[in-house]
Image: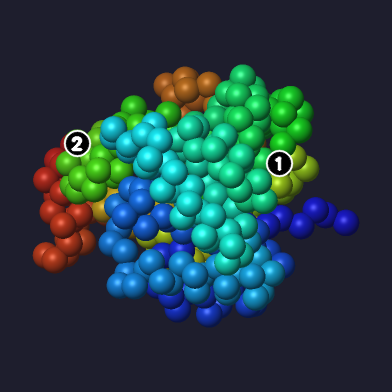
Amino acid sequence: MAKKIQYSIGYNQDIKMLEFLDSYTEHIESIYFPMPETYLPSGRNMPFEKGYHKNIKTIIKKCADIGIGSQILLNATCEGTSCANTLHMKKVVNYLKTLSGTGLKSAAITNPFYITDIKKEIPELELHSSINCYTSNIEQALYLKDMGVDVLTIDRDINRDIGLIKRIKKATGLKIKLLANEGCLSNCPFRKMHFNSLAHRIPDKPFLERSCITVISKDPKKIFRIPFIRPEDIKHYRPFTDYFKLATRTFPTSQIEITLKAYINEEHNSDLLDIIDMTSMKCYFTFINNKVLDSLNFFENMQKCTLDCKKCGYCETLLKKAAILNTGNKSPKCKKCEIYYKIIEPNISAR
Protein backbone atom coordinates (compact mmCIF):
# COMPACT_ATOMS: atom_id res chain seq x y z
CA MET A 1 0.00 0.00 0.00
CA ALA A 2 1.35 3.41 -1.00
CA LYS A 3 2.37 5.74 1.79
CA LYS A 4 -0.26 8.43 2.38
CA ILE A 5 1.07 11.92 1.85
CA GLN A 6 -0.06 14.79 4.05
CA TYR A 7 0.06 18.49 3.26
CA SER A 8 0.55 21.63 5.29
CA ILE A 9 -1.49 24.54 3.95
CA GLY A 10 -1.25 28.25 4.73
CA TYR A 11 -3.98 30.39 6.27
CA ASN A 12 -4.98 33.23 3.93
CA GLN A 13 -6.55 35.70 6.40
CA ASP A 14 -10.03 34.43 5.51
CA ILE A 15 -11.67 32.72 8.46
CA LYS A 16 -14.15 31.07 6.06
CA MET A 17 -11.25 29.01 4.75
CA LEU A 18 -11.69 26.75 7.78
CA GLU A 19 -15.07 25.59 6.47
CA PHE A 20 -13.72 23.25 3.76
CA LEU A 21 -11.12 21.53 5.91
CA ASP A 22 -13.45 18.81 7.23
CA SER A 23 -13.48 17.09 3.82
CA TYR A 24 -9.69 16.74 3.70
CA THR A 25 -8.60 15.96 7.26
CA GLU A 26 -6.82 12.71 6.39
CA HIS A 27 -4.70 14.59 3.86
CA ILE A 28 -3.79 17.64 5.97
CA GLU A 29 -0.85 17.62 8.36
CA SER A 30 -1.38 21.17 9.58
CA ILE A 31 -2.64 24.68 8.95
CA TYR A 32 0.12 27.26 9.28
CA PHE A 33 -0.41 30.92 10.11
CA PRO A 34 1.78 33.90 11.07
CA MET A 35 2.54 35.43 14.44
CA PRO A 36 0.64 38.67 15.11
CA GLU A 37 2.71 41.66 14.06
CA THR A 38 2.87 42.89 17.64
CA TYR A 39 5.33 40.06 18.28
CA LEU A 40 7.14 39.32 15.01
CA PRO A 41 7.09 40.40 11.36
CA SER A 42 5.86 38.01 8.69
CA GLY A 43 7.40 36.20 5.74
CA ARG A 44 4.64 37.44 3.44
CA ASN A 45 3.60 40.98 2.50
CA MET A 46 -0.15 40.79 3.00
CA PRO A 47 -2.66 42.57 5.25
CA PHE A 48 -3.91 40.92 8.42
CA GLU A 49 -7.66 40.50 8.74
CA LYS A 50 -9.52 42.47 11.39
CA GLY A 51 -9.46 40.56 14.65
CA TYR A 52 -6.67 38.21 13.51
CA HIS A 53 -5.23 38.05 17.03
CA LYS A 54 -8.49 36.50 18.26
CA ASN A 55 -8.94 34.33 15.17
CA ILE A 56 -5.71 32.50 15.95
CA LYS A 57 -7.50 30.77 18.83
CA THR A 58 -10.36 29.89 16.46
CA ILE A 59 -7.89 28.33 14.02
CA ILE A 60 -6.20 26.30 16.77
CA LYS A 61 -9.55 25.06 18.10
CA LYS A 62 -10.80 24.11 14.64
CA CYS A 63 -7.64 22.14 13.97
CA ALA A 64 -7.94 20.34 17.31
CA ASP A 65 -11.61 19.55 16.69
CA ILE A 66 -10.93 17.85 13.35
CA GLY A 67 -7.66 16.20 14.34
CA ILE A 68 -5.07 18.12 12.33
CA GLY A 69 -2.08 20.16 13.47
CA SER A 70 -1.94 23.92 14.01
CA GLN A 71 1.37 25.62 13.27
CA ILE A 72 2.46 29.17 13.98
CA LEU A 73 5.14 30.81 11.86
CA LEU A 74 8.18 32.55 13.28
CA ASN A 75 9.60 32.83 9.80
CA ALA A 76 10.74 36.43 9.30
CA THR A 77 14.36 36.68 8.16
CA CYS A 78 15.02 39.96 9.97
CA GLU A 79 13.97 41.23 13.40
CA GLY A 80 16.37 44.14 13.54
CA THR A 81 17.89 44.74 16.98
CA SER A 82 15.33 42.38 18.56
CA CYS A 83 16.77 39.24 16.96
CA ALA A 84 18.71 38.24 20.09
CA ASN A 85 17.14 40.53 22.68
CA THR A 86 16.39 38.52 25.82
CA LEU A 87 13.30 40.47 26.87
CA HIS A 88 11.82 40.39 23.39
CA MET A 89 12.43 36.67 23.02
CA LYS A 90 10.88 35.99 26.42
CA LYS A 91 7.77 37.89 25.31
CA VAL A 92 7.51 35.71 22.19
CA VAL A 93 8.06 32.47 24.13
CA ASN A 94 5.44 33.44 26.73
CA TYR A 95 2.93 34.07 23.96
CA LEU A 96 3.67 30.64 22.50
CA LYS A 97 3.16 29.12 25.96
CA THR A 98 -0.30 30.65 26.05
CA LEU A 99 -1.15 29.25 22.61
CA SER A 100 0.29 25.85 23.47
CA GLY A 101 -2.06 25.77 26.43
CA THR A 102 -4.99 26.15 24.01
CA GLY A 103 -3.79 23.33 21.72
CA LEU A 104 -1.12 24.77 19.39
CA LYS A 105 0.86 21.80 18.05
CA SER A 106 3.94 23.21 16.32
CA ALA A 107 6.01 26.23 15.34
CA ALA A 108 8.12 26.86 12.21
CA ILE A 109 11.20 28.87 13.11
CA THR A 110 13.80 30.85 11.15
CA ASN A 111 15.81 32.53 13.92
CA PRO A 112 17.84 29.73 15.59
CA PHE A 113 17.96 31.62 18.90
CA TYR A 114 14.31 30.70 19.41
CA ILE A 115 14.80 26.99 18.84
CA THR A 116 16.73 26.20 22.03
CA ASP A 117 14.61 28.54 24.17
CA ILE A 118 11.29 27.13 22.97
CA LYS A 119 12.51 23.54 23.23
CA LYS A 120 13.47 24.21 26.86
CA GLU A 121 10.38 26.19 27.86
CA ILE A 122 7.71 24.38 25.80
CA PRO A 123 9.01 20.83 25.21
CA GLU A 124 5.61 19.60 24.04
CA LEU A 125 5.65 21.98 21.05
CA GLU A 126 6.94 20.33 17.87
CA LEU A 127 9.57 22.49 16.19
CA HIS A 128 9.97 22.74 12.42
CA SER A 129 12.83 24.54 10.75
CA SER A 130 11.45 27.28 8.50
CA ILE A 131 11.95 27.19 4.75
CA ASN A 132 13.88 30.42 5.38
CA CYS A 133 16.60 28.50 7.22
CA TYR A 134 17.74 27.50 3.70
CA THR A 135 18.69 23.98 4.81
CA SER A 136 20.53 22.61 1.80
CA ASN A 137 23.25 20.31 3.16
CA ILE A 138 23.87 17.70 5.84
CA GLU A 139 25.96 19.95 8.10
CA GLN A 140 23.23 22.62 8.31
CA ALA A 141 20.64 19.95 9.03
CA LEU A 142 22.73 18.45 11.84
CA TYR A 143 23.14 21.87 13.48
CA LEU A 144 19.37 22.28 13.52
CA LYS A 145 18.86 18.78 14.89
CA ASP A 146 21.30 19.45 17.72
CA MET A 147 19.43 22.67 18.58
CA GLY A 148 16.18 20.73 18.94
CA VAL A 149 14.38 20.78 15.58
CA ASP A 150 11.95 17.88 15.11
CA VAL A 151 11.07 18.38 11.42
CA LEU A 152 13.40 19.71 8.73
CA THR A 153 11.91 21.90 6.02
CA ILE A 154 14.35 21.53 3.16
CA ASP A 155 15.56 24.47 1.07
CA ARG A 156 13.36 24.44 -2.00
CA ASP A 157 16.41 25.09 -4.20
CA ILE A 158 17.41 21.44 -3.76
CA ASN A 159 13.91 20.01 -4.36
CA ARG A 160 15.11 18.26 -7.50
CA ASP A 161 18.27 16.84 -5.92
CA ILE A 162 16.64 13.68 -4.63
CA GLY A 163 19.92 12.04 -3.70
CA LEU A 164 20.93 14.94 -1.45
CA ILE A 165 17.55 15.04 0.31
CA LYS A 166 17.80 11.31 0.99
CA ARG A 167 21.28 11.78 2.46
CA ILE A 168 20.05 14.58 4.74
CA LYS A 169 17.23 12.37 6.01
CA LYS A 170 19.56 9.44 6.61
CA ALA A 171 22.15 11.56 8.43
CA THR A 172 19.65 13.26 10.74
CA GLY A 173 16.92 10.67 11.18
CA LEU A 174 14.42 13.56 11.26
CA LYS A 175 11.12 13.96 9.49
CA ILE A 176 11.40 15.83 6.19
CA LYS A 177 9.08 18.48 4.76
CA LEU A 178 9.35 19.89 1.22
CA LEU A 179 7.80 23.10 -0.11
CA ALA A 180 6.13 21.96 -3.32
CA ASN A 181 4.66 24.96 -5.09
CA GLU A 182 6.59 28.16 -4.50
CA GLY A 183 7.37 30.15 -7.65
CA CYS A 184 10.58 31.99 -6.76
CA LEU A 185 13.49 31.64 -9.18
CA SER A 186 15.88 28.77 -8.71
CA ASN A 187 18.82 30.00 -6.60
CA CYS A 188 17.32 33.48 -6.79
CA PRO A 189 19.96 36.15 -6.14
CA PHE A 190 17.27 38.50 -4.78
CA ARG A 191 15.63 36.05 -2.38
CA LYS A 192 17.28 36.98 0.92
CA MET A 193 16.94 40.71 0.29
CA HIS A 194 13.30 40.22 -0.67
CA PHE A 195 12.45 38.34 2.52
CA ASN A 196 14.29 40.92 4.59
CA SER A 197 12.20 43.63 2.95
CA LEU A 198 9.02 41.68 3.71
CA ALA A 199 10.04 41.51 7.36
CA HIS A 200 10.19 45.32 7.37
CA ARG A 201 6.87 45.68 5.49
CA ILE A 202 8.52 47.34 2.49
CA PRO A 203 6.12 47.23 -0.49
CA ASP A 204 6.70 44.54 -3.13
CA LYS A 205 6.77 46.99 -6.04
CA PRO A 206 10.56 47.69 -6.05
CA PHE A 207 11.23 43.96 -6.23
CA LEU A 208 8.70 43.40 -8.99
CA GLU A 209 10.30 46.20 -10.96
CA ARG A 210 13.94 45.26 -10.50
CA SER A 211 14.31 41.62 -9.52
CA CYS A 212 12.88 38.22 -10.48
CA ILE A 213 10.50 39.35 -13.17
CA THR A 214 13.28 41.12 -15.06
CA VAL A 215 15.16 37.81 -15.25
CA ILE A 216 12.09 36.03 -16.62
CA SER A 217 11.39 38.82 -19.09
CA LYS A 218 14.85 38.40 -20.63
CA ASP A 219 14.77 34.60 -20.60
CA PRO A 220 11.24 33.25 -19.97
CA LYS A 221 12.28 29.61 -20.27
CA LYS A 222 13.89 29.99 -16.82
CA ILE A 223 10.41 29.59 -15.35
CA PHE A 224 10.82 25.83 -15.80
CA ARG A 225 13.98 25.87 -13.70
CA ILE A 226 11.93 27.08 -10.70
CA PRO A 227 12.14 24.08 -8.33
CA PHE A 228 8.41 23.45 -7.92
CA ILE A 229 7.19 19.89 -7.53
CA ARG A 230 4.17 19.19 -9.69
CA PRO A 231 1.32 17.03 -8.30
CA GLU A 232 2.22 14.29 -10.81
CA ASP A 233 5.77 14.14 -9.43
CA ILE A 234 4.89 13.69 -5.75
CA LYS A 235 5.24 9.93 -6.19
CA HIS A 236 8.99 10.27 -6.69
CA TYR A 237 9.35 11.80 -3.21
CA ARG A 238 6.93 9.61 -1.27
CA PRO A 239 9.49 7.08 0.08
CA PHE A 240 11.58 9.68 1.93
CA THR A 241 9.33 12.71 2.48
CA ASP A 242 7.01 12.93 5.47
CA TYR A 243 5.10 16.10 4.62
CA PHE A 244 4.70 18.60 1.81
CA LYS A 245 4.08 22.28 2.42
CA LEU A 246 1.86 24.18 0.01
CA ALA A 247 2.37 27.94 -0.34
CA THR A 248 -1.21 29.22 -0.17
CA ARG A 249 -1.22 32.25 2.12
CA THR A 250 -1.75 34.67 -0.78
CA PHE A 251 -4.36 32.47 -2.52
CA PRO A 252 -8.11 33.06 -2.32
CA THR A 253 -9.90 30.24 -0.52
CA SER A 254 -11.25 28.69 -3.74
CA GLN A 255 -7.73 28.47 -5.17
CA ILE A 256 -6.41 26.86 -1.98
CA GLU A 257 -8.95 24.06 -2.34
CA ILE A 258 -8.14 23.60 -6.05
CA THR A 259 -4.44 23.38 -5.22
CA LEU A 260 -4.92 20.97 -2.33
CA LYS A 261 -7.15 18.68 -4.42
CA ALA A 262 -4.60 18.65 -7.25
CA TYR A 263 -1.85 17.51 -4.90
CA ILE A 264 -4.05 14.98 -3.12
CA ASN A 265 -5.03 13.46 -6.49
CA GLU A 266 -1.46 13.88 -7.76
CA GLU A 267 -2.82 15.26 -10.99
CA HIS A 268 -3.61 18.67 -12.48
CA ASN A 269 -5.07 18.78 -15.97
CA SER A 270 -5.04 22.51 -16.54
CA ASP A 271 -2.95 25.65 -16.01
CA LEU A 272 0.14 25.15 -13.87
CA LEU A 273 -0.14 28.81 -12.82
CA ASP A 274 -3.35 27.97 -10.93
CA ILE A 275 -1.52 25.90 -8.33
CA ILE A 276 1.99 27.43 -8.18
CA ASP A 277 2.53 30.53 -6.02
CA MET A 278 4.01 32.77 -8.70
CA THR A 279 1.66 35.75 -8.83
CA SER A 280 4.10 38.13 -10.51
CA MET A 281 4.76 35.60 -13.28
CA LYS A 282 1.11 35.86 -14.34
CA CYS A 283 1.93 39.30 -15.71
CA TYR A 284 4.18 37.52 -18.20
CA PHE A 285 2.50 34.16 -18.79
CA THR A 286 -1.15 33.65 -19.68
CA PHE A 287 -1.12 29.83 -19.47
CA ILE A 288 1.24 26.91 -18.90
CA ASN A 289 -0.24 23.56 -19.89
CA ASN A 290 0.67 21.11 -17.18
CA LYS A 291 -0.35 18.07 -19.21
CA VAL A 292 2.05 19.04 -21.99
CA LEU A 293 4.82 19.01 -19.39
CA ASP A 294 3.76 15.44 -18.61
CA SER A 295 3.86 14.42 -22.25
CA LEU A 296 7.38 15.85 -22.55
CA ASN A 297 8.66 13.90 -19.51
CA PHE A 298 9.22 17.00 -17.40
CA PHE A 299 10.43 15.34 -14.20
CA GLU A 300 12.88 12.99 -15.87
CA ASN A 301 14.40 15.73 -18.01
CA MET A 302 14.73 18.26 -15.18
CA GLN A 303 16.59 15.65 -13.14
CA LYS A 304 19.29 15.67 -15.84
CA CYS A 305 19.59 19.48 -16.11
CA THR A 306 23.20 20.69 -16.34
CA LEU A 307 22.31 24.36 -17.03
CA ASP A 308 23.88 24.02 -20.48
CA CYS A 309 20.86 25.59 -22.20
CA LYS A 310 22.55 26.16 -25.57
CA LYS A 311 23.38 22.49 -25.91
CA CYS A 312 20.18 21.10 -24.40
CA GLY A 313 17.23 23.12 -25.72
CA TYR A 314 14.66 21.25 -23.60
CA CYS A 315 13.27 24.30 -21.75
CA GLU A 316 12.99 26.18 -25.04
CA THR A 317 10.84 23.32 -26.30
CA LEU A 318 8.67 23.59 -23.18
CA LEU A 319 8.28 27.31 -23.74
CA LYS A 320 7.09 26.77 -27.31
CA LYS A 321 4.80 23.81 -26.71
CA ALA A 322 3.38 24.37 -23.19
CA ALA A 323 3.37 28.12 -22.52
CA ILE A 324 1.37 31.08 -23.76
CA LEU A 325 2.95 34.46 -23.12
CA ASN A 326 0.88 37.46 -22.06
CA THR A 327 1.17 39.88 -24.95
CA GLY A 328 -1.35 42.53 -24.07
CA ASN A 329 -4.06 41.90 -21.48
CA LYS A 330 -3.38 45.02 -19.45
CA SER A 331 -5.74 45.92 -16.63
CA PRO A 332 -5.89 49.66 -15.87
CA LYS A 333 -6.49 48.89 -12.18
CA CYS A 334 -3.67 46.38 -11.76
CA LYS A 335 -0.41 47.78 -10.41
CA LYS A 336 1.39 44.62 -11.46
CA CYS A 337 0.21 45.14 -15.04
CA GLU A 338 1.68 48.65 -14.92
CA ILE A 339 4.99 47.09 -13.92
CA TYR A 340 4.54 44.43 -16.60
CA TYR A 341 4.17 47.00 -19.36
CA LYS A 342 7.04 49.10 -18.03
CA ILE A 343 9.54 46.26 -17.91
CA ILE A 344 8.39 43.28 -19.89
CA GLU A 345 6.65 44.58 -23.01
CA PRO A 346 9.91 45.75 -24.64
CA ASN A 347 11.34 42.26 -24.20
CA ILE A 348 8.27 40.64 -25.72
CA SER A 349 8.61 42.93 -28.71
CA ALA A 350 12.24 41.96 -29.00
CA ARG A 351 11.32 38.29 -29.14
Picture quarter with the N terminus: bottom right
The residue located at (72%, 36%) in the rendering is 174
Helix, strand or loop for disc 2: helix
Left of 300 or right of it: where is 204?
left
The residue located at (11%, 45%) in the rendering is 342
Helix, strand or loop for disc 1: strand
In front of the other: 259 or 44: 44
Mark closer to the chain start, 2 or 1: 1
Q: Quadrant of residue 299?
A: top right
Left of 348 or right of it: where is 150?
right
In this rendering, the label closer to the viewer, 2 or 1: 1
Which residue is identified by label 2? 210
The residue located at (54%, 38%) in the rendering is 117
Q: In this view of the protein, can residue 273 be seen by the observer?
A: no
Q: Residue type at mark 1? A: Lys
> Measured from the top left, where is residue 51 in percent x and y?
34, 72
The residue located at (30%, 43%) in the rendering is 199
The circle drawn on residue 175 is 1
**Residues under numbered marks 2 and 1 in contact, where contact means CB atoms less than 8 Å apart:** no
> Marks 2 and 1, how far apart in space?
37 Å
Colouring convention used in this rendered image of the protein: rainbow
The correct choice, above or below, for 299 with respect to 168 in the image is: below
In front of the other: 330 or 24: 24
**Label 2, residues with CA under 10 Å away: few <14, some 14-19, many ≥20:** few
> Measured from the top left, where is residue 140 in percent x and y?
58, 23
The correct choice, above or below, for 147 with respect to 8 in the image is: above
